[in-house]
Image (tube, rainbow, N blue to C red):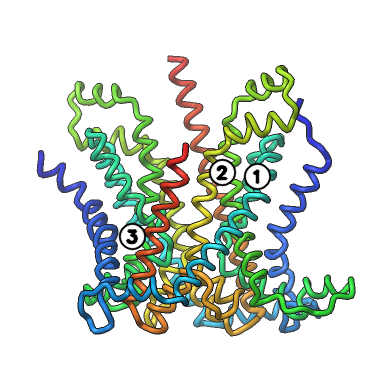
Amino acid sequence: MKLRKNLFMLPYLFWLLLFVILPLILIVVQSLIGTDGQLTLANFVSFFTSGTYLSMTVNSFIYALIVTVITLVISYPVAYILTKLKHSQFFLLLIILPTWINVLLKAYAFIGLFSQSGWINQFLGIFGIGPTQLLFTDFAFIFVASYIEIPFMILPIFNSLKTINGEYIHAANDLGATRFQTFTKVIWPLSLDGVKSGIQSIFIPTLSLFMITRLIGGNRVITLGTAIEQHFLTTMNWGMGSTIGVILMIIMIASMKLTNGSK
Amino acid sequence: MKKKSKFELIYLTLVMIVLYFPIFYLIYFSFSSGDSMSYFESFTFDHYQALLNDPRLIRIVLDTILLALLASLFATMIGTLGALYIHQVKKKSVRNSLLSLNNILLVSPDVIIGASFLILFTFAGFSLGFYSVLLSHIAFCVPIVVLMILPKLKEINPTLIDAAYDLGASKYKVLSAIILPLITPGILSGFFMALTYSLDDFAVTFFLTGQGFTTLSVEIFSRARRGISLEINALSTLMFLFSLLLVIGYYFLSRYNQNRKINNQKKKVTK
C-alpha cells in the first residue's frame, strides 16, 4: 500500500530532482568555475569590476524598463475598453491570437517592414522623409519587443478589471466623484494586482530576450539574455555565462519580491 | 451607463490593426512573385510550391510536430501524476514548497533554462540532438500541466470519494472511475498548453539542438538571419492557419468544459 503510493509519485519527483533542482545547482556551480577549471569567485569579481558588463546590465535594465512602461501605457486603456464591450471574450481572443504565432515569424515580419525599402520607409517617404535606417536600431528593438509583449500585459489587467464590483463605481459616482477621481481612487487601486502580474510577465523576459536583439537590434549585445547566449554558444565561456545567468535569476527573484511584497 | 466613446473604439481598432498588420504583411507577400517584402509584383503560388518541394523543410516540420506530440504526451503523464501527488499532500507548508518548485521552470527565463539544461546534458555525457531536445521539452511542459489539473482536483467533492470507498471501491477503482473522468478536461487543456509551449519554443531548443537536429523555430531563425526569403512568408501563412485551427480547437474545448460544468450544476440542482 505504502509502496504503491510512493511508486506513482516517482516520475514527478524524479522530474523535480533532475530537471528543476539539479540544473539550478549546476548553473550555480558552473558560475563558480573559472577558465582554469578551479573553484573561484573570479567570474563574479570580473563581472562587478568590468565596465562592459556593468554598463550592459544597466542598459539591459533600461531597455526592459522602457518596454514595460510602453506596454503598460498602451495596454491599460485597451484592457479597460475591452471590459466595457459586449463581446469582450471574443475581442480578448483576437488580442491573444497573435501570441499563438511563432515569435520568430513576427520578428521576421519586422525585418521586412523596417527595411530600407519596406512599407514603413515607403510611408515615411510620402511625407518627404527619405529612407532612414530603422532596422538594427534601439527604436526597432523597443518597438518589436513591446509589440510582442502587449497581449501579455492586456490579459492580466483585463482579468483584474473584470473582477471589480460595478457597485463600487456606482457608489463613487453617487458620492460625487469625478471620472478622474473614480479612476485614481477606485479602479486603479483595484486593478493593481493585474498590473503587477503584467509587469512581472514582461520585465524579466525582456531582460533575457536574445533572439530579437540579434534579428532586429543587430549584433550588438544589449540584453543579459544575449550576453548569456553569446558566452555559452559563441565564446564558450560557460563560467561567465552562468555568472550572468545567476545574476539574472537574482534580479528576477528581487523584482518578483518587489512587485509581490508591496501590497 | 456603459458609455463607449468614439475615441475608445478608434483606439481599440488602432491597437488591433497594429497587432495584426505584421502578420498580414507576411501573408500578403507570400503571394508576391518578387523576392523582397517591399513591392508586390504579381500574384503567384511559387513560394508555396518551393516549400512543398523542399524535403529538408518538410522533414523539419514533421520533426517539430512529432517532437511536440511526444513531449506533450509524456509531460501530460508526468504532470497528471504530479498533480495527483501534490493534491494529496496534506501539510500546507510541504504543498506550497512543492508548488514553488513546480513553478520554477514556468517563471525562469528561457535562456536560463536552455543554458542550465545544456550544462546538465553535458555533465551527464548526454549527446545533443533529438533526445536532448525532447527531454528538455518534456521538462518545461510538466509544470503547466500540473497547474491546469490541480484546480480540477480541488473541485472534486470529497464526499463523492468517501462514498465510493464506503461502497467498497478499491483505490485504483476510485482513481479510474471517479477522479480521472472528473479531471479529464484539465488533462486535455494541460496537453494542449504543452503542445503550444513545445511548438513555440525557440530559446531552449536553440541551446540543445547540437548539429544534426533542428526544429522549425530554429530553422526560421537561421534563415531570417540570412535575410528575406519569401518561402518563409509562405511557411508563416501555413503556420498562421495552423495556429488558427489550434485556437478554434481550444475554444471549443473550453466551451465543452463550461457546458459540462453547467450541465453538472443543473443535475445537482434537479437532484
Instruction: Identify the secondary structure beneath mark 2.
Output: helix
Label 1, on which residue?
Answer: A76
* Image quarter in which the N terminus of chain B is found: top right
Tell me the CA gap for discs 2 and 3.
29 Å
- In percent of width and height, residue B164 lies at 24, 25
Q: Amino acid at mark 2?
A: Val
Label 3, on which residue?
Answer: B139
Asked if residue B37 is positioned above or below residue B259 in the image, the reply reads below
Label 2, on which residue?
Answer: A195
Residue drawn 45% across the image and 26% down it: B264
Residue A106: quarter of image: bottom right
Mark 1 or 3, closer to the camera: 1
Q: Amino acid at mark 3?
A: Ala
Query: How many neighbours does mark 3 have within 10 angstroms: few (below 14), some (14-19), or many (20 or more)?
Result: many
Asked if the residues shown at circle 1 and circle 3 are in contact, with their CB atoms under 8 angstroms apart, the answer is no
- In this view of the protein, can residue B48 be seen by the observer? no
For this view, does B94 lie left or right of residue B113? left
Residue drawn 47% across the image and 77% down it: A52
Query: Camera-side residue: A118 or A66?
Result: A66
Residues beneath discs 2 and 1 located on the same chain: yes
Mark 2 or 3, closer to the camera: 2
Instruction: Identify the secondary structure beneath mark 3.
Output: helix
